[in-house]
Amino acid sequence: MFNITFEYPLLLLSILPFIACSVFCKAKSPTYYMPHLNIFKDSKNKTNILLSILKWLIVVFSIVALASPIRTLDTKLVQNDGIDIILSLDTSGSMRAIGFNKDNVEQNRWQAVSIIVKDFIKKRVSDNIGLVVFGTSVLTASPISFDKNTQSEIIDYLDIGIIGDKTALVDSLASSINILKDSKSKSKIIIVLTDGIDTASTIPLKVINNLSLKYGIKIYAIGIGESNKNLLNQITKKSNGKSFIANSSEDLEKVYAEINNLEKSKIDSNKIILKEYLFFFPLFFAIISLILFTFLKNKE
């Protein structure tokens, strides 16, 4: 129920010598007959019983503390040969258009995209992922991170027009490359999604092509609806990437699924076990028992 185990369970066996000694190694004390002291007999017996209990509490709690009780909080896969991925997402005003999701025609493009992107993030279990969003300007929503839950929460807080209604597509690629350029990962990719032509960038596309080649970054470009297919091809061709057009949320799911299959990362079977150490609790009770034992012993 509490998922509590011991790091050094064999140390629990050290209780056995104490039990054996209590049976076979009893100390012999001289006996004195003191008349007229019967009235102290009951009190003395009670004290001896309490001292005996405290003595065993000290021993048991100390041994339990030495065995190091732990509670397992979580188990995570160790990242091994993962891919560093930047997801660059369009939050321009045109993402307010509805009808992209045929199963929910009232849902706007951003709402449909955010659901699909969060699902993609969950599937990339061994990869570091960063988030960039763009409108009139560009915002790094999340640096490269292994924390998928936090990134999904960040996407929930993002919204259309958060940084303007225009589309700085090429500038977003520059910011994405700037995040990835110092990465030590063997594979680095950018997946940029937009639903329109570039209307706000200040950086020439030629610079992006040169930088992607210099730092070994592959770019996948996804266009929604009537996006500029020619521009998407120019973005991806130099980096040995690929461009896609999605006319519905169903198409977009297939695009992300294809990218997921194209960019496989090796997942190691090793695991990280997150632990909570609990030795403090038995140690605390052992110390309290020792203090009470000492106090009562000195009163005899």
Image: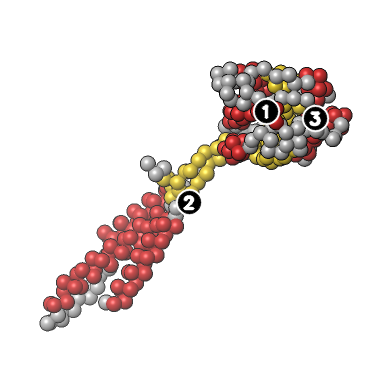
Picture coordinates of residue 177 (x, y %)? 78, 35
Q: Earlier in the sequence, mark 1 or mark 3?
A: 1
The amino acid at mark 2 is: Tyr
Give the distance between the C-alpha atoms of the residues marked 2 and 3, in whole angstroms: 55 Å
Q: Is residue 6 above or below residue 41?
A: above
230 sits to left or right of 55: right
Q: Is residue 271 above or below residue 297?
A: above
Q: Residues within 10 Å of mark 1 (few under 14, many from 20)?
A: many
Q: Is residue 37 above or below residue 97?
A: below
Q: Earlier in the sequence, mark 2 or mark 1?
A: 1
Residue at (70%, 27%) from the top-left corner?
94
Disc 1 target residue: 95
Picture coordinates of residue 271 (x, y %)? 56, 37
Give the distance between the C-alpha atoms of the residues marked 2 and 1, in whole angstroms: 48 Å
The amino acid at mark 1 is: Met
143 sits to left or right of 71: right
Residue nearest the observer in this picture, 72 or 190: 190
Q: Secondary structure at mark 1?
A: helix
Disc 2 target residue: 277
Picture coordinates of residue 110 (x, y %)? 64, 29
Splitting the image into 4 quarters, where does residue 287 fall? bottom left
Q: Secondary structure at mark 3?
A: loop
Q: Is residue 189 above or below residue 7?
A: above
Q: Is residue 139 visible?
A: yes
167 sits to left or right of 160: right
Give the distance between the C-alpha atoms of the residues marked 1 and 3, in whole angstroms: 14 Å
The amino acid at mark 3 is: Thr
Disc 3 target residue: 199
Residue at (28%, 60%) from the top-left corner?
22
Q: Nearer the viewer, mark 2 or mark 3?
A: 3
